Amino acid sequence: METAGFIALKEVEKTFFLGKNPVPAVRNFSLTVEKGELLCLVGPSGCGKSTLLNLIGGLDRPTRGNILVGGTDITRLGENELCLYRRRQIGFVFQSFNLLPQFTALENVELPLIFAGMERQERLRLARELLERVGLGERLLHRPTELSGGQQQRVAIARALVNRPAILLADEPTGNLDTASGGEIMALIKSLNEEGITCIIATHDREVAAYAHRIVVLRDGAVVRIEEL
Ligand SMILES: Nc1ncnc2c1ncn2[C@@H]1O[C@H](COP(=O)(O)OP(=O)(O)OP(=O)(O)O)[C@@H](O)[C@H]1O
Ligand SMILES: [Mg+2]
């Protein structure tokens, strides 16, 4: 039985292939993350931040090594189980918000609950509750083009959290925002983290990383050092 760390990556390797040419993206990467931690992955473009988030989130599989989450080795799960893992345990937030343009804020947040098979009244109640939590109680019926960038990212965060995942993964969540909106998004993520959700954030931005408990500095797919704040 695994006890050390809520999330444990053990000697993880990820190599992509371009034709026959191997492109190592993550090399011999080991790390444990505790429940309730806010961790940032930083490092130059191409150092493997997004690849690591995709591996932890079960969007991709490592070439070698193991990834344990709550004692389960997700590298051993079949496709259906991995899909359930993503749906139940993971909330994902992207740089480009990825909202559906034809739907309102409320409908965008409701969507994961439709896939989860939840009944309509309950869906609407939960989606509204999450949008209120991220400060958008007055914008429920706005479509993405009728919202600011920071507001769109709040909707994306509400959508990521509506299934009550244990882990929030965010890939450059402030990358498309001005400094002020970026600061507001990080303050929101910090307060959600203080409510108990484990957060792992990939960023170029040292100001974003300053919100973390620990910063993992990467280069060429490997850990250069870990800073405790
Ligand atoms: N699907 C893929 N096929 C081939 N190579 C890939 C693929 N995805 C990523 N890579 C390579 O893997 C390495 C790591 O990429 P990754 O996207 O994880 O970097 P990153 O740290 O997120 O960079 P950025 O800060 O620019 O987002 C890079 O060298 C990249 O070119
Ligand atoms: Mg990236």
Image (cartoon, helix red, strand yellow):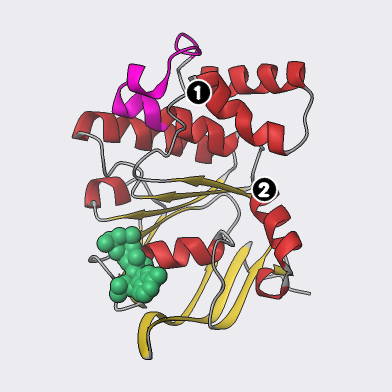
- Left or right: 191 in relation to 19: right
Q: Position of residue 38 (x, y in %)?
A: 46, 50
Q: Name which quarter of the figure residue 220 lies in.
A: bottom left
Examine the rendered structure and indicate whether residue 77 appears above or below residue 22. above
Q: Which residue is painted at 58% across and 83% down in the image?
A: 65
Location of the N terminus by quadrant is: bottom right
Q: Which residue lies furthest to the bottom in this view?
A: 20
Disc 2 is placed on an element classified as helix
Disc 1 is placed on an element classified as loop
Q: Position of residue 47 (x, y in %)?
A: 30, 71
Q: Residues within 10 Å of mark 2 (few under 14, many from 20)?
A: many
Q: How many marks can you see? A: 2
Residues drawn in magenta: 137-153
Contact (CB < 8 A) between labels 1 and 2? no
Viewer-side residue, 225 vs 23? 23
Q: Which badge, 1 or 2, comes first in the chain's sequence?
A: 2
Location of the C terminus by quadrant is: bottom left
Examine the rendered structure and indicate whether residue 105 appears above or below residue 30. above
Q: Name which quarter of the figure residue 202 lies in.
A: bottom left
Q: How crowded is mark 1: few (under 14 residues within 10 Å), some or many (20 or more)?
A: some
- Left or right: 13 in relation to 76: left
Examine the rendered structure and indicate whether residue 212 appears above or below residue 116. below
Q: Which residue is painted at 46% across and 8% down in the image?
A: 138
Mark on residue 103? 1
Q: Position of residue 55 (x, y in %)?
A: 52, 67
Q: Which residue is painted at 53% across and 17% down in the image?
A: 132
Q: Can residue 53 be seen in this view?
A: yes
Q: Is residue 33 visible?
A: no
Examine the rendered structure and indicate whether residue 14 appears above or below residue 115. below
Q: Name the residue under label 2.
A: 87
